[in-house]
Image (cartoon, rainbow, N blue to C red):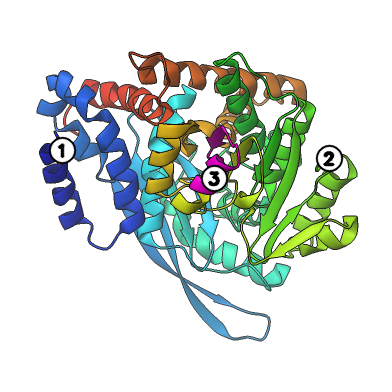
Amino acid sequence: MEAQIKEFMDGVRMKNPGEDEFLQAVEEVVETVWDFYQENPHYKKAKILERMTEPERVIMFRVPWVDDNGEVHVNRGFRVEFNSAIGPYKGGLRFHPSVTLSGLKFLGFEQTFKNSLTSLPMGGGKGGSDFNPKGKTDFEIMRFCQAFMSELYRHIGPNTDVPAGDIGVGGREIGYLFGQYKKLRNEFTGVLTGKGIEYGGSLIRPEATGYGAIYFVREMLAEKDDSLKGKTVALSGFGNVAWGAATKAVELGAKVVTLSGPDGYIYDAEGVSGDKIDFLLELRASNQDIIKPYADQFGVEFFEGKKPWDQKVDIAIPCAIQNELNKEDCELLIANGCTLIAEASNMGCTAEAAFLASEKISFAPGKAVNAGGVAVSGLEMSQNSMRINWSEEEVDQKLNQIMTNIHKVCVEYGTGFDGSVNYIKGANIGGFVKVADAMMAQGIV
């Protein structure tokens, strides 16, 4: 089997040289679905895996824009439309200097499985630009967004491709992008999600990824007759995902003790709750990409330049970026008594860390844990189509049910002979089956 997987991956590497993030994501999926793939020769005959690891379409374009001083800048724009077998392409737009085609292909590939797990009719896609919104004025960001959408609008639509926000793309950017799309197409449709409530957005969308992650962790613990009550939790990041996760974890009885930024992390022994969570919103809105102001505000410990994985906690949830938790971090967490790691960020753990965690403790991958964000985006699409608005309680209830169902799928496909659950295997096979069956039904396209 190892020789067959190596042969398959060698072929993928030849087609995608140097795209390490994408290759890492593909290899993780291929390794866990290979046995299932071999047991179902109709998939193999139709070359489903070969087709599934090749995006349906990659769009790359230049984005020229003018700053407040009249200087011309040129950025690159991307949209990777990966798989539309079960619905319109769906996935975020990321504005960050680190954006590359490899990174977006990885995210679009992961998004295909994640969206499949939600059971909502959404395909997988991802896009963005190497534009950095940090330090830019509102007018500069508006001009960039308008320039970006002036090309992207040709390739998207409510029944074709429905982008959302991601790193560097929040409510402000979505508003500018939507306004330009509406002007160019002369139509008001649900072509973007993460919109403002005033013009078609859904309640709890900013918190949804974090909420969903905690609902999934709750189900992981319940599988072992345990609960969140009294558990200590380490979170990384301090954006929307960490904010949502902290809010819901506290609501369900846990204590969140860490948050982090590029400058380091804070340790709050009393727990992040109440006005401290409110402060996160203020800190995020101030466009400060640092967490130290939290330590100054509440008089807690700040660890400059370090990651939050050296504290003694029960649960660790990476909420920031890919590969932020490595093997050494994982070993330290386990040595300090951590019994569960769940990725709320996309591929938050390196391959070595994910393997170690899945062998030693309970571990769940991002495509399952962080599906709550895109799930509520899907619910926003439904509300837009029906021209209605659901209450916060209704959206939260639907999110809760979706995450519970995703956990059931992971257990169904990931439970071993000894009764333990391999969540990586469960999520990958569970996501694979629906997409593969839809691809089979639609022929060789």
**Residue bearing mark 2:** 273
Secondary element at tag 1: helix
The stretch in magenta equals: 331-345
Could you classify mark 3 by the number of other residues whose Cα lies within 10 Å: few (under 14), some (14-19), or many (20 or more)?
many
- Residue 338: say if magenta: yes
- Does 432 appear above or below 160? above
**Residue bearing mark 1:** 2
Occupied quadrant, residue 111: top left
**How far is mark 1 from mark 2, CA to CA?**
48 Å
Q: As drawn, is 51 to the left or to the right of 388? A: left
User: Where is residue 281 shown, x and y percent of the image?
Assistant: 80, 50
Tell whether label 2 touches label 3 (CB within 8 Å): no
Q: As drawn, is 240 to the left or to the right of 411? A: right
Identify the amino acid type marked 3: Ser
Which of the labelled discs sits on residue 345, or is there none?
3
Q: Nearer the viewer, residue 230 or 150?
A: 230
Residue occupying the point 60% across, 42% down: 336
Identify the amino acid type marked 1: Glu
Secondary element at tag 2: loop
Identify the amino acid type marked 2: Ser
- Which numbered disc flags the more N-terminal residue, 1 or 3? 1
- Which numbered disc flags the more N-terminal residue, 1 or 2? 1
- Does 337 appear above or below 68? above
Could you classify mark 1 by the number of other residues whose Cα lies within 10 Å: few (under 14), some (14-19), or many (20 or more)?
few
Q: As drawn, is 95 to the left or to the right of 138? A: left
